[in-house]
Image (cartoon, helix red, strand yellow):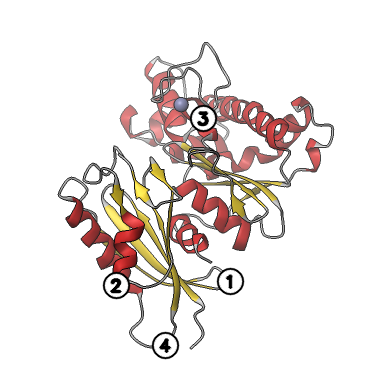
Amino acid sequence: MEKNFFVGVDIGGTKVAAGLVNGVGEIASQARVPMVSTSSAADGLQAVLAAIARVIPDHGAQVAGIGICAPGPLDPKTGIILNPPNVPCWRNFPLAESVQKLHSVPVKVDNDANAAALAEARWGAARGYKQVFYATIGTGIGTGIVFDGTIYHGRTGSAGEGGHVSIDYHGPLCRCGKPGCIEILASGTAITQRARDRVSAGEKSCMLELVGGNINAITGEIVAQASAAGDPLAKKILGEASEMLSVWLSNMIDLLDPDVIVIGGGAAALYQPFFDQIRERVAKITLNPRAMEVPIVSARYGADSGIAGGAALCA
Ligand SMILES: [Zn+2]
């Protein structure tokens, strides 16, 4: 029987999601199980195997490979999970090898942004492009670089951490220790925090009414909602963040000269109304004289990007 399905696995600190993905990147079925990340290494592995078992069909379609998105740091060459803060049960844990012992198919491991970039390049918004820069904007900012259908890993597998490229030497300190990383300035978390701070400081905004006076209930969605309704403060916050994103994206274009830029992640929707503004600004400040030709597009995969990404690793 033809093996034309792939299993994509997305490991988080509290859950493991797995999906059966076909040869054109459609997710045929998926399942979630709780992740026991603070228990033993074996318990953590058991959760991954349980999720995989839930989506591998007993009959019919055969599986050609299993790809796993896991929290870093990890070694994509060996499939070893090094010492991820989000999954403390694994220290130098041979994840790919452990899964391969039970399923005699190729098993690949990578971080979620790299894998999601590959899924976009293979099946999604970047299909048909050779040089792809992908950014996922959510609680943080993750990025992946794909050249000619292959993830760019660098020397040790640590390349592609574009979220920790700084645009401001005097900026706030990022969790990585660097000042002014784009992640600390323009992630969904950063936008939410800035909105809460400014409303707390007494700046007038309809955001306060939208959350019934509870400043801590202001979320990215509330900022987007207020901005769409014409609220000046919300518009200003998203406009400033878009400006920061433009500077950063122009850095990425000057460094990589990609064929396409794909933006995904839970907070990407916040920026969607500003995409035209970002495109114009990027074209204006980039050294590359043909920067305006680089499409900046929305990702195909949303919450399923980890599953699709995992599958793409072995497709
Ligand atoms: Zn950083």
Residue named by callout 3: 186
* Residue 201 position within the rendered picture, expressed as x and y whole percent measured from the top left: 40, 14
Q: Please give the name of the residue rendered at 48% of the width and 56% of the height, measured from the top-left corner.
A: 305
In space, the residues marked 2 and 3 are separated at their CA atoms by: 38 Å
The count of marks equals 4
- Front residue (pair 285, 202): 285
Give the residue at the far top of this rendering: 170
| Marks 2/4: CA–CA distance | 15 Å
- Lower sequence index among marks 1 and 2: 1
In this rendering, which labeled residue sits more in front, label 2 or label 3? Answer: 2
Q: Position of residue 169 (x, y in %)?
A: 54, 13
In the image, residue 2 above or below residue 50: below
Seen at 73% across and 38% down, the residue is 257
- Residue type at mark 1: give it: Val
Q: Are marks 2 and 3 in contact (CB under 8 Å)?
A: no
Q: Are marks 4 and 3 in contact (CB under 8 Å)?
A: no
Give the mark nearest the N terminus, 4 or 3.
4
Q: Earlier in the sequence, mark 2 or mark 4?
A: 2
Q: Crowdedness of circle 2 by 10 Å Cα count: few (<14), some, many (20+)? A: some
Residue extending farthest right: 289
Amino acid beneath label 3: Ala
Outermost residue toward the left in this view = 39
Q: Residue 53 — which label?
A: 2
Q: Is residue 173 above or below residue 40?
A: above
Determine crowd level at label 1: few under 14, some 14-19, many 20+ residues with C-alpha closer than 10 A. few
Badge 1 is on which residue? 24
Tell me: 277 left or right of 39: right
Rendered view: 229 above or below 312: above
**Element carrying mark 2:** helix
Q: CA distance from mark 4 to mark 3?
A: 46 Å
Q: Which mark is residue 60?
A: 4
